[in-house]
Image (cartoon, helix red, strand yellow):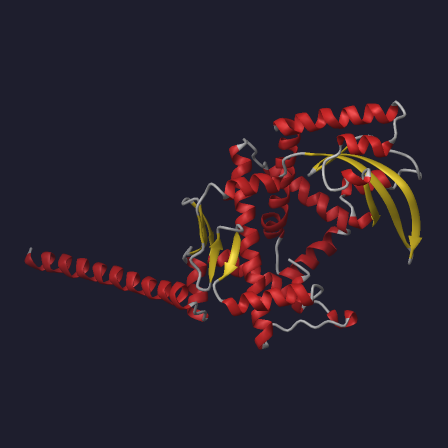
């Protein structure tokens, strides 16, 4: 009996010792990550199995360091699989400046992941849910738009190291939530109702033969109102997809029906057209009735929840609502690139 009791004591002691060791290990890892920003093989292995947060949103949702690291790894892989030399560009993340550029990519990636998470939260609050069939259909649409399915899957793996499920998670689902939120706004938001009525009145006056510029000055929202709706010259790629689809079908002088877009309702007039360097350019005017956008909902939500970034060197800038650097030298480096090298290849994608 005494022997059994001693055995139980030893087992209990061992169990407590293991627990203490594990807690000590996780505490040390946490201090190294959050306190010193250290990254090494052991830490990389740990964050794969331990869901440590890179960002905490509204106290209940979080983005893991592992998810951020995986996305950063995919972005780096993308750059390393590109030949920018034909463009006279070079991307090297191993140099001192290159490492700073990679930190900028990491910050911007985390910011996008935070935004995507909040948009998903907003969508679910509106009763919007994504079904497996919807996601699958959207994956097929995106693949079919881009070309051969087998080739696209091979490119996803080669360029990003992604499987189809990772493509769904990183690209398809965020896009679907945004599209469904836009649809919800168009159909349910009070401002959309007002704007839809206003653009309908504008279209009726156009069909009654009134001058387009006068109607734009009367009804249109935005900076073009004072110029009678004149927007300028654009290629199809520079316009919102729903607008470009309508514009390319118009003849010069012709006016479109009402066009819905993620930012509102439009009536477009094609005032001129030309071909420049083998690219069709369109001079357009518009009557625009704005709606609340997904960006507006995002801004409102960000203003009413707590977002915390525990990673070393980063914080949530509450004034401007984005992930920002603590290090002033990195801020200056980033500002210098954007102000003086806007076409820097390291900032062109993702």
**Quarter that holds the C terminus:** bottom right
State how many labels appear: 0
Residue 134 in picture, x, y percent from top left: 64, 37
Quadrant of the rendered image containing residue 14: bottom left
Tell me, yes or no, if residue 256 can be seen here. no
The one of 54 and 270 positioned closer to us in this rendering: 270
Say if 285 sits above or below 113 in the image.
Answer: above
Nearest the eye: 291 or 38: 291
Vertical side of 63 occupied by 265: above or below: above
Residue 343, relative to residue 217: is it above or below? below
Task: Give the farthest residue toward the front.
Answer: 226
Relative image position of residue 314 (x, y in whole percent): 47, 61
Q: Quadrant of residue 94?
A: bottom right
Tell me what residue is drawn at x 75 percent, y 46 percent.
Answer: 144
Name the residue at 78% across, 46% down.
Answer: 239
Q: Which of the pair 237/42 is nearer the observer?
A: 237
Residue at (46% x, 57% y) in the render: 315
Whether residue 309 is visible: yes
Residue 155: image location, x then y, percent:
70, 59
Name of the residue lying farthest toward the bottom: 95
Residue located farthest toward the left when viewing the structure as drawn: 2
Location of the N terminus (image quadrant):
bottom left
Residue occupying the point 32% across, 62% down: 27
Please identify the quarter of the rendering in which residue 11 is found. bottom left
Instruction: Find residue 232 and report its horizontal and vertical position in percent.
Output: 83, 47
Comparing 148 with 82, the one in front is 82
> Is 307 positioned to the left or the right of 175 in the image?
left
């Amino acid at each position: 009996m005494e022997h059994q009791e001693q055995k139980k004591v030893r087992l209990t002691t061992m169990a407590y010792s293991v627990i203490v060791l594990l807690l000590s290990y996780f505490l040390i890892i946490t201090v190294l990550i959050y306190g010193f920003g250290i990254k090494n093989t052991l830490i990389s292995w740990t964050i794969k199995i331990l869901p440590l947060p890179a960002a905490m949103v509204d106290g209940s949702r979080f983005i893991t360091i592992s998810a951020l690291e995986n996305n950063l790894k995919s972005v780096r892989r993308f750059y390393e699989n590109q030949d920018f030399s034909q463009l006279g560009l070079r991307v090297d993340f191993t140099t001192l400046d290159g490492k700073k550029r990679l930190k900028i990519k990491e910050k911007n990636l985390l910011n996008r992941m935070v935004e995507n998470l909040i948009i998903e939260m907003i969508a679910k609050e509106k009763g919007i849910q994504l079904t497996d069939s919807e996601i699958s259909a959207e994956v097929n649409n995106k693949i079919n738009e881009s070309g051969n399915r087998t080739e696209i899957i091979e490119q996803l793996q080669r360029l990003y190291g992604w499987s189809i499920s990772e493509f769904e998670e990183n690209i398809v689902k965020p896009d679907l939530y945004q599209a469904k939120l836009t649809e919800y706004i168009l159909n349910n938001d009070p401002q959309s109702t007002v704007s839809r009525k206003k653009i309908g009145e504008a279209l009726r006056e156009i069909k009654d033969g009134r001058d387009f510029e006068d109607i734009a000055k009367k009804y249109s929202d935005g900076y073009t109102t004072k110029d009678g709706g004149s927007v300028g010259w654009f290629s199809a790629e520079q316009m919102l997809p729903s607008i470009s689809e309508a514009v390319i079908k118009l003849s010069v002088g012709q006016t479109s029906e009402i066009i819905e877009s993620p930012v509102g309702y439009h009536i477009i007039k094609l005032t001129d057209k030309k071909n420049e360097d083998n690219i069709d350019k369109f001079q357009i005017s518009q009557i625009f009735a704005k709606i609340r956008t997904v960006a507006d909902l995002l801004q409102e939500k960000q203003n009413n929840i707590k977002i915390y970034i525990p990673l070393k060197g980063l914080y949530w800038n509450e004034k401007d609502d984005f992930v920002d650097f603590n290090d002033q030298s990195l801020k200056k480096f980033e500002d210098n690139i954007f102000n003086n090298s806007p076409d820097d290849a390291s900032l062109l994608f993702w």
